[in-house]
Amino acid sequence: MRAVNVLSYSFSAIKLRKFRSALTILGVAIGITAIVALLSVTQGLQATITDDLNQGLSANSLIVMPGSSGQGGDSGFSIGIGSSSDSSGFSLYNNYTSQIVSLSPNITGAVAVMQKFGYVESDSLNRSVTIYGVDYATYAEIYGTFVAESGTIPLNPKNDTVIIGSRVSDPRQNGTRFIVPGDEINLLWLNATSFPTVNENCTVQVSGVLDTVGGFGMGGPSDTGVYIPLSSAESFFGTDACDMIIVTLTNTDKATIDSVSSLIREHFENQVLVISADAVQSVVASIISTIELFLGGIAAISLLVAGVSIMNIMIVSLIERTREIGILKALGMKSRTVLLIFLGEAVIIGLIGSIIGIIGGWVLAHGVSWVLSSGLLTGNSGGFAIKPLLTPTVVFVALIFGIGVTVVFALYPAWSASKLKPVDALRHE
Amino acid sequence: MTAIIEAVDLRKTYMMGKVPVEALRGVSFRVNAGDFIAILGPSGSGKSTLLNLIGALDKPTSGVMRIDGVNVSKLNDARLSVLRLKIGFVFQSFNLIPRLSAKANVELAMSIADMDASRCSRRAVKLLTIVGLKERMGHKPAELSGGQQQRVAIARALANNPKFLLLDEPTGNVDSKTANEIMALIYKLNKENGVSIIMVTHDQKLAGLAKRTINMFDGKIQSDVVN
Ligand SMILES: Nc1ncnc2c1ncn2[C@@H]1O[C@H](COP(=O)(O)OP(=O)(O)OP(=O)(O)O)[C@@H](O)[C@H]1O
Ligand SMILES: [Mg+2]
């Protein structure tokens, strides 16, 4: 029997049992919806994070932080904010930048960053921020995102100058500015180096507000950061040890990154961590793929449930159609063709279910990302925008899974149908 | 003349749980091309069992069933299918596929034999016209009378130009007028088209139309006479 005829025969059987077929298709569609929504959200998440990391830590820069790298690997890292020395007492100092630059011709610049968690207080706003001490001129050279959207970033700032991130000025990101250039604000931070710890504060004057950066700001400009001159930070925080030194390189190839990284580690006798954008991304990617695997497993179980119900329905349909199978075989149909007819039904159901599921998953993914970005869940202004990604791979995986599961679960019923003896099948009422 | 069917000491034993039921107990006969045979016998005498063996729908427990010189017991599943394509079988209970129209039922038999769609369609129309169902081709079995369904079944059995036609009580479920029409059709097929026919019936009068009558009793051939 020709393939077209096999398929059209399968299709006529599906049409006959519309309601039951619809339920089976629904089962497949739900499973595929879950898988597609999940994959496209996590892939979107990965793309967003990768994007954000590229904003915060460009591919041609390294972050040097105090800390020992354990077995000497550069994949494990921790980011200790506000602790300018590690447990061994080693500190990075602001004036180490020139030593670092002279280590290799591949290094184009180095900038020290001091940071502390703190608060901003003004007449209208009180919120937590990260206070950074940086040299405005060199910092702006490294990060193209360190530009003022309003006000200015002075090259020779006064001691009480401050530049603020866009979310500090406009926390809801809706155009309502609580702090504008020219305002006086109060910065507060906790001095953990003295005992007992004390809250310290100072009054500074806003000179500029940064353009919205987005992203996480790994060392780079952040929307929730406030930036004071490095010299002010030294005197406010009472130390000239920095939290990180950002090193820029001539190029982004792995060989350069690796050789410069080990030069820096050796120079500081393995008392520093050197983090590259690459390493961060691979850690993030591995975290995301773990999440993906876990959620994917749950989605796969739902598909498995659909598979079992397909098997159940196929067995019922087989029993109902025993006589029909007897007729087909008596007319000279080969066992293989009977098998193909039943598998054909499964393929059609799997295909329709998968297509519905892919569309459903796409819609669901957009729903989820809308809920996330609207901040309904977190309850505050800070939504997290993910753009779901429906890659050809996701579509392909969904189709393979949807059709694969239905076919696998239809195999046994289809096989037993094909093995029926015509006389026995014809006697069946 | 060469035999198209040759049965040698056929035996068929069914197991009803642990109890063996001997449906056929040593049946031998030959059928030549162009024959028209009526098989008579009381209920349970093994007529349908024998017809199933001739139709290659089942294999004997022992003995040899040769169709066109080929021992059916020796054929594998795929070869049996090919053999069945060449046998026209009309069942006691019609056995049409309910969701398909009369025409589609006839076409199905041909598409199983790999005939292309347009030829299937043309031949189905021709066959249904021969059996007098030209006006009813689009109807589903449930929308047809018993006699009409029987005629669709005959058209389907003829679809692949079978070597011979097997009919299991073709007039068992219809009134006497329709029975006469069907018998006239079968008679014509044998006489004019040269189709060999083996027909199981209870009706002594219809059996009189056949060239030869086989009487079955208790799993054996009691008599085999040329009319
Ligand atoms: N599949 C089977 N399993 C068990 N016993 C069977 C089976 N098929 C037939 N038999 C038995 O074999 C015997 C012959 O049956 P068969 O159907 O050949 O009779 P028949 O002559 O066609 O009768 P009828 O005129 O009623 O159709 C009967 O006793 C029947 O009960
Ligand atoms: Mg019978």
Image (spheres, coloured by chain):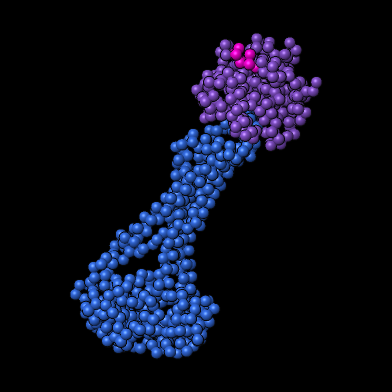
Seen from the viewer's position, the closer of residues A194 and B152 is B152
Q: Does the magenta segment cover residue B185?
A: yes
Q: In this view, does A158 lie above or below B69?
A: below
Quadrant of the image containing the N terminus of chain A:
top right
Establish if B169 lies above or below A203: above
Boundaries of the magenta span: B179-186
- Vertical position of residue B45 compared to residue A219: above or below: above
Q: Is residue B219 visible?
A: no
Which residue does the image show at 30% across and 74% down from the upper left?
A149
Location of the C terminus of chain A by quadrant is top right
Q: In this view, does A87 lie to the left or right of B218?
A: left
Q: Residue furthest right?
A: B1
Drawing shade for chain A: blue
Query: Measured from the top left, where is residue B172 in percent x and y?
Result: 59, 16
**Which residue is located at x 45 percent, y 69 percent?**
A284
Q: Where is residue B156 in the image (x, y as percent from the top left)?
A: 61, 25
Q: Would you say B91 lies left or right of B29 here? A: left
Magenta stretch, overall SS: helix
Q: In this view, does A224 lie to the left or right of B48?
A: left
Q: Which of A175 and A70 is in front in this view?
A: A175
In the picture, which chain is purple?
B
Residue B139, percent from left and from top: 51, 24
Residue B118 in sight from this viewpoint: yes
Residue at image point 60% right, 40% down: A3
Residue B188 part of the magenta segment: no
